[in-house]
Structures are given as C-alpha cells and as structure tokens.
Amino acid sequence: MNVTIPSRPSPRRPAGAPKSGWLAILEQGANLVQQATPLSGFDVYVVGLHCAKHDPGMQMEAHHYCRVVNDDLLQCVIFDGNTADANLIGIEYIVSGSLHATLPHEERGYWHPHNFEVLSGQLAAPGLPAPAEKALMKQLVNSYGKTWHTWHTGRHDGQPGDEVPMGEAMLMWSFNRDGEADESLARNRDEAMGLDTAGKREQRRDLVGLAAPQDGVDTLRDRFDGTRPVEGVVQA
C-alpha cells in the first residue's frame, strides 16, 4: 500500500541564477549513462529536531535519509525538507550503544544521545505503519549520533537562514528534556506534517524499560530554563 507523506518544502531558496541550458543538458545525459550507486539504499526516512551544541538556541528541522550499513552503524544525509528542492544541510552517523562504548573517551564528546528523541515521540518516520515505526525506534534506543551541519537554512516557522553555506561546520546536539526544543518549531512541524508527538510518546512507553543511562544527556542541561525530565532519559 502506497502512503502519501506530507510535503515539507525547504524554508530557504538558495542564492544563484536558475539552471542554465547546458546544466540541464548535462543532467539529462547523466541520468542516461551514469549511476548514483553510493546513493542507493538511503531509504530510511526520519525527521527530528536538532540544535547546535555551541549555540543551542540555533534549532531546526532535520530530515534524515539513512542507509543501514550493519546492526551497529547507519549513515545519513540531512536535508531541510523532503521535496525535490530540499537543501542538503548536513550528515549524521548513528552507532549503537555497544559500538559507542568502544570509542575513546575524548571522541564521545562528539556523539549525542538518542533516547529522548525516541521516548519523547519527537523523532518520527513519516509514512511508516505504526508497528514498523516502533520497530525502527526500538533499534534506535541507546544509540548515538555524530552530526555536522554545514548550512543553516533557517526554520519553517519563519526564522530566516543563510542563502549559501556560511562559516564552519556546526556540531549538532540532541534535546534531552521537555521544554528544550522551541515550542513554535515543534508545533509547526507537527501541524504541517500531521505528526502526533504525544501519541507517539504513549505508543513507545514500553521502550522505556530498554533505555540505559547515556553519555551527553546533561551536556546542555544548564543552557535551558524550565525544562522537565522524561522517564528513561538519564545521564550515565
């Protein structure tokens, strides 16, 4: 059964002139004779919310298209929407908790925890039937992500971004308590894409027992006011 996923256009049109005739011809030729082999398999689609580790007030939607490398590693490309005009804004590597435990201590500071995203219902897999989405989320319990954004294109709720990638790549972080993500940002996404974050949280309640304490849960705790903990999301 085909499921229609609500369209989420990019919040930013890039700078630059329209595609010229020669570029359009080149693209058509590539479609006929070239293969995008490394891109095959990036078909796991999840949408979440990110903030910059150095500046958690910088927040945005993150539309991930991921390839499952093996049981312990996923590779994702991140866009600011899910339509043909979406801008590529970053990358994320996802590792299991067991693989994360093998990393050097100094390396772990680059990896954000995922339990809040899963257990709070904030992370969603649009278009997947509920049982399949829950099975995916179960696989992501106790996992970690290393995420770099190269372009802040703004927010769908009206905050502007850059017309071209600017500055250094930004190390991103996860939200780990209720109230950390801007309410306007979260509400705008849920309303536009027909997502029920509260309902997903309830459906995933039985995953709480699988959640282990994680590194990084308290990293940005003092950068937000008036936040509330979520059951199962605990600092290691």
Image (spheres, rainbow, N blue to C red):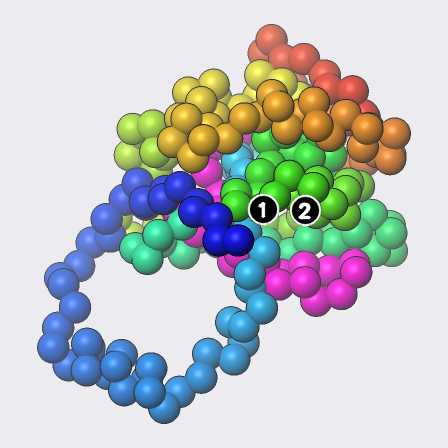
Going 19% across and 77% down the picture, which residue do you hit? 23
Q: CA distance from mark 1 to mark 2?
A: 6 Å
Mark 1 secondary-structure assignment: loop
* Residue for badge 1: 128
Return the x and y of residue 60 as percentages of the image width and height.
45, 36
Can residue 235 be seen at all in this image of the molecule? no
Q: Residue furthest front?
A: 1
Which residue range is magenta in the image?
56-81
Identify the residue at image location x=77%, y=42%.
138
Magenta stretch: helix, strand or loop mostly: strand
- Depth check, front residue: 82 or 14: 82
Contact flag, marks 1 and 2 (Cβ < 8 Å): yes
Residue type at numbered disc 1? Leu
Q: Is residue 211 left or right of residue 178?
A: right
Give the secondary structure at mark 2. Answer: helix
Task: Give the label on residue 132, or none.
Answer: 2
* Front residue of 31 and 113: 31
Residue furthest to the top in view is 226
Quadrant of residue 122 in the image? Answer: top right
Q: Is residue 77 magenta?
A: yes
The spot of residue 140 in percent (x, y) is 73, 45
